Amino acid sequence: MLELKKGADILEVIGGITTADAAKAILAENLDATNQEKLAKIKNPEALIKVANAISMCSPASVFVNTGSADDQQWIREYSLEKGEEKKLAKDGHTIHFDLPQDQARLVNQTFYIINEGEQMSSLAKSLLRDEAMHYVREYMRGVMAGKVMMVGFYSRGPVGAEAAIPAIEISSSGYVLHSAELLYRNCFSDFDNEVERAGLFYTNVHAEGNNTPEDVPNARILMDRSWQTTFSTFCTYAGNTLLLKKGNHRFSVDYATYYKLGEQISEHMFITGMTGPNGRKTFFAGAAPSGCGKTTTAMVGTDFVGDDLAQMWIADDGTLRAINPEKGIFGIVEDVNREGDPYLMDCLRGDDTEVIWSNVLIDDKGVPHWVGNGEQAPERGTNFQGEWWAGKTDADGKAIPMSHKNSRCTLLASAIANHATEVAEDPAGAPIKVITYSGRDADTMPPVWVAKSMDEGVIIGASIVSQATATEIGTTGVRRQPWANAPFIPGSLSDYMKAQFTFFNSRKFSDAGRPIMAGLNYFLTHANRGSSGKGLLGEKKDVRVWLGWLDLYAHGDVEAIETPIGMLPKYEDLKPLFTAIDKDYPKSLYDLQFAIYTDNIIKRIELQTEAYSHETDIPVELYNVYRHQKEALLALKEQFGPVIAIDDLS
């Protein structure tokens, strides 16, 4: 069990401010008249104490309070340019930010949860005891903003007033971080006090980039205090490590939902998107996939895109599943973003009138960004995060250096994208979710789409995601398990999180019509592992529309499915017209390859997962029951049909 406000509050101990009066004195001493007048509108004493302690600890030269006004936003833009954190590009409103070569992704080996003695953690999490974390913060963060401007912003992780939205404070000496926050989150300065009262809590984030040199990066740390819901980030600028409103606060939200909103809320690493079905029907999906596994592409395939990364979910009074996107913008990977697969996003990136912060792409001599996989003619020369680049440039080992980093990003408002469902995204009632999907990178085992036969089996689909390590994580390699695509962001024990999943999706609060279906997706099945002489993937990026389209039909009872031990599979005659709708031929031979059941592969996967979860304590028995039943049924079919079961044998 997580106990909030347990142990010493590191920010308060080092800052030394414990009362509202002491906080007011620090604020009066360090803020000019304009910023004092702004901050006077925040009345919550705990929030003022947090800000005062950050000032006391970091010792900035001055403090800028960001109210979210047009003037304040412009000040932040100009300050980031003045500092050299961003540079203007050819298009109006476009800027480039380069992170250090050593700081291009999440620093997973330098990211820790701050815990108290005896707290049970996820086996996939790294942690520091409170005293160790206190030592680091005291050594490296005292005076870290000397000579710099501290910027303070007040944000909401979700539409103001939404059931699962939680307010947060973002404190940073980086103009780029605050500029990004204004694009990605809802500034709730004017509503902050009311939102704290409604939610009963807020998160605090303190970031200092220091001198931003390669020599500093080994000392970089991303520390997340679970008990006090406060993050500390130092000596880095990559937004995944510094804009801790994002993944840092997502971790706190996972904790809060797991331990304080059991059966009421869940916090997921999921896209939210809507599809238009027959007769204009709107069906909303929420889907989990590890970073770099097609989550953004899937989200934007929808006719009513809401979000590409995170979802806060709850059961509404009418018995439906509801979800909000904590963010209002996109911090998206740009590699392989092109006209064919991502036309709406490309309109923003190559069109006019969209504010975009680019990071770690190539900039040519005309101030135009370029990236790998954009489907355009690449320039011969340019500048990227490593400095000067030219076609054919190699590293010290003789390997070709790509023009852009695999984790290059674009940051922009989601509402700029043509298929964004802005009204739904900003509605505190949330989007009504009818379908939950889980996917990873799976070359040889699961079919492109399958539906769980029960809520328990649906939870197990999420628990069983596997994926390759991607460029979003520094210090990881190979193929590994990715439970719920949320594993890097689950602070507590996996058993507690799994219990929360079973409890939530089996809740009696759901109405019969409101309970979602749960499904698996797999875009990465290859010819090589399906007895085919072909090469590459057994499909294309645009096939996503078909798999989501079929799930829409199935969720509303418009089509039937074929029952198998692993779940319900689509019939060929129902997929064929969906492929025709995307102007693609879909021969029965391809369907047969995609949906054949390779029993040995699936059984090995079940055994891998069973063995891995056996190292966790108190895993709910439902997991093992589902695995056992599926394995027994697969073995029985193998005995009847052999190791490879044709889909026609089951239809």
Image: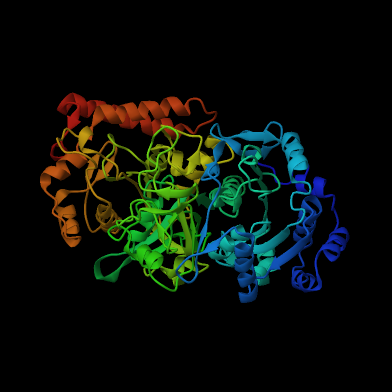
Question: Which of the image's four quarters has the N terminus?
Answer: top right
Total numbered circles? 0
Can you give x and y, in whole percent of width and height, for residue 437 in the image? 37, 49
Q: Residue furthest bottom?
A: 70
Residue at 28 percent of width and 34 percent of height: 445
| Residue drawn at (30%, 31%) of the image | 602
Question: Where is residue 377, by image quadrant?
Answer: bottom left
Q: Is residue 281 found left or right of 34 in the rendered image?
A: left
Front residue of 126/176: it is: 176
Q: Kindly tell me whether residue 546 is visible in this rendering.
A: yes
Residue 84 falls in image quadrant:
bottom right
Residue 159, image x and y in percent?
55, 66
Q: Is residue 460 left or right of residue 94?
A: left
**Quadrant of the frame with the C terminus:** top left
Coloring applied to the structure? rainbow
Residue 398, image x and y in percent? 39, 34
| Relative vertical location of residue 338 with respect to residue 446 in this rendering, above or below | below
Q: In x, y percent, where is residue 45?
A: 79, 61
In this view of the protein, which residue sits in the foreground, 425 or 542? 542
On screen, residue 476 above or below 303: above
Choose between 597 and 391: the one closer to the eye: 391
Quadrant in the rendering for residue 274: bottom left
Residue 516 in sight from this viewpoint: no
Viewer-proximal residue among 430 and 363 = 363
The answer to whether 9 is drawn above or below residue 155 in the figure is above
